[in-house]
Image (cartoon, rainbow, N blue to C red):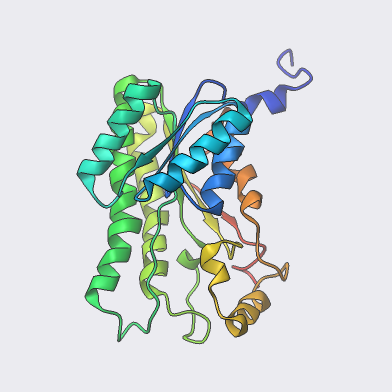
Amino acid sequence: MSTLERGFVAQSFRLDGRVAVINGGRGEMAIAMGAALADLGCNVVFMSRKVEECEAVANDIGPRFGVRTLGLRCDVSNEAEVETAVARVVEELGQIDILINNAGASWWGLPEEIPLSGWQKVMDVNVTGTFLACRHVARHMIARGQGGSIINVASVGAYLSYTPDKGQVVPYTTSKAAIVHLTSNLAAQWSSHGIRVNAIAPGSIETGMTKTVPEDQKAKLLDGILLRRFGKPIELTGTVALLASDAGGFITGQTYIVDGGQTIA
């Protein structure tokens, strides 16, 4: 009982001195997750193909929370770029303790009409890109010998099948289902190295992608959410903080659904 002192729960979430990498490091979800980690004392690297936007995010969050930040270019579907980016982070910040795989692509259309190039683009970014980032960061974590936390961003689409009037996103949902299984597989493979691998499966979140959905389709989506609203990016941060920190130190191989009840409505 001696460890159960005032503030012990809050302390277990602290990430002071640790380094996190977020790919897909621009947009509202990446900003919210990065700010949450920074608020807990973590240094944060934002990476994507659009390096200027990542640099802008890094330059805003770093001073605001008093942590070190970087904005780097990285196309996760390109292994050479992933390897270079990981090496740059280690060179500049000394280590990587946390990886969040947030990069994602989608393709809208009926499955009988989707071009192979569209299917391949989604798989290259969502599945292969996630694997490549996991692999190169895990190599560093294994060599360093101090474990780490990997968080993959899946989707409730991994558990849902849509009729055409509600969604024509077969490549996207298929790729996210693959991420759920990849997560548990990598957790099993790397457990002996102290690397925890988990995923979050957001539901319909108010981001750029959701805002482009036609109004009639938004209404149908809302009918399938128990809380009758879209989620906010900030509502993912509690789960991210848990999985990134020592507070979630006994959690691995799991996918946390954060969807306002969308998967059971």
Q: How many marks?
A: 0
Q: On the picture, is 196 further left or further right than 82?
A: right
Residue nearest the observer in this picture, 239 or 188: 239
> Where on the picture, by quarter, is residue 4?
top right
Residue pictured at 48% horizontal, 67% vertical: 157
Where does the image place residue 181, in percent across and percent down from the top left? 38, 55
Query: Which quadrant of the rendered structure holds the C terminus?
Result: bottom right
Q: Residue furthest left?
A: 80
Query: Which quadrant of the rendered structure holds the N terminus?
Result: top right
Residue 254 against residue 88 in the figure, above or below: below
Where does the image place residue 231, in percent across and percent down from the top left? 65, 60
Residue nearest the observer in this picture, 8 or 20: 20
Residue 250 visible in the displayed image: no
Q: On the picture, is 201 further left or further right than 105?
A: right
> Where on the picture, by quarter, is residue 138?
top left
Q: Residue furthest top?
A: 2
Residue 206 visible in the displayed image: yes
Residue pictured at 53% horizontal, 82% vertical: 166
Residue pictured at 22% horizontal, 45% vertical: 79
Residue pictured at 40% horizontal, 53% vertical: 103
Residue 206 against residue 80 in the figure, above or below: below
Q: On the picture, is 135 further left or further right than 56?
A: left
Residue 250 against residue 56 in the figure, above or below: above
Where does the image place residue 145, in percent across and percent down from the top left? 35, 20
Where does the image place residue 43, in percent across and percent down from the top left? 50, 28
